[in-house]
Amino acid sequence: MTPERMRAIMVNQNLTNSDLMVIANCSMRSVSNWRNGFSIIPRPISIILEGMERDKINRDWLVQQVENELRELVD
């Protein structure tokens, strides 16, 4: 995935840098580096973004998965 494609999907899916930071469990710097082409976008992130763009991954489902993961970490 190119940085341009990533940015386009984020715009189409109304995803902010903060949203992607939570989804990827990474720092804001990592997201910024991906968006600006300074670092390679990890394959799992590319798959998630493409899945969302193709309506294969529902945003609500993804949020629920992240919330469940965070809840397990706290318990």
Image (cartoon, rainbow, N blue to C red):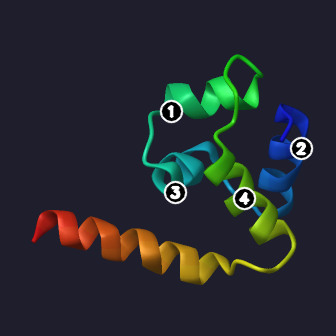
| Vertical arrangement, residue 48 with respect to residue 68, above or below | above
- Judged from the image, the secondary structure of the residue bearing numbered disc 1 is helix
Question: Comparing marks 3 and 4, which lies closer to the viewer?
Answer: 4
- 10 Å neighbourhood of mark 4: few (<14), some, or many (≥20)? few
Q: Earlier in the sequence, mark 3 or mark 1?
A: 3
Question: Comparing marks 2 and 4, which lies closer to the viewer?
Answer: 4
Decide if residue 69 is on the left or right side of residue 45. Answer: left
Between the residue at mark 1 and the residue at mark 2, the CA separation in whole angstroms equals: 19 Å
Q: Which residue is mark 1?
A: 28
Q: Quadrant of residue 35?
A: top right
Question: Comparing marks 3 and 1, which lies closer to the viewer?
Answer: 3
Say which quadrant the N terminus sits in. Answer: top right
Q: Earlier in the sequence, mark 1 or mark 2?
A: 2
| Vertical arrangement, residue 12 with respect to residue 68, above or below | above
Between the residue at mark 3 and the residue at mark 4, the CA separation in whole angstroms equals: 12 Å
Give the image location of residue 72, x and y in percent: 21, 72
What amino acid does circle 3 point to? Ile
Q: Which residue is mark 3?
A: 23
Q: Earlier in the sequence, mark 3 or mark 4?
A: 3
- 10 Å neighbourhood of mark 1: few (<14), some, or many (≥20)? some
Between the residue at mark 4 and the residue at mark 1, the CA separation in whole angstroms equals: 19 Å
- Judged from the image, the secondary structure of the residue bearing numbered disc 4 is helix
Q: Which residue is mark 2?
A: 5
Give the image location of residue 28, x and y in percent: 50, 33
- 10 Å neighbourhood of mark 2: few (<14), some, or many (≥20)? some
Question: Comparing marks 4 and 1, which lies closer to the viewer?
Answer: 4
Q: Earlier in the sequence, mark 2 or mark 4?
A: 2
What amino acid does circle 1 point to? Met
Decide if residue 53 is on the left or right side of residue 18. Answer: right
Q: Which residue is mark 4?
A: 47
Question: Comparing marks 1 and 2, which lies closer to the viewer?
Answer: 2
| Vertical arrangement, residue 48 with respect to residue 44, above or below | below
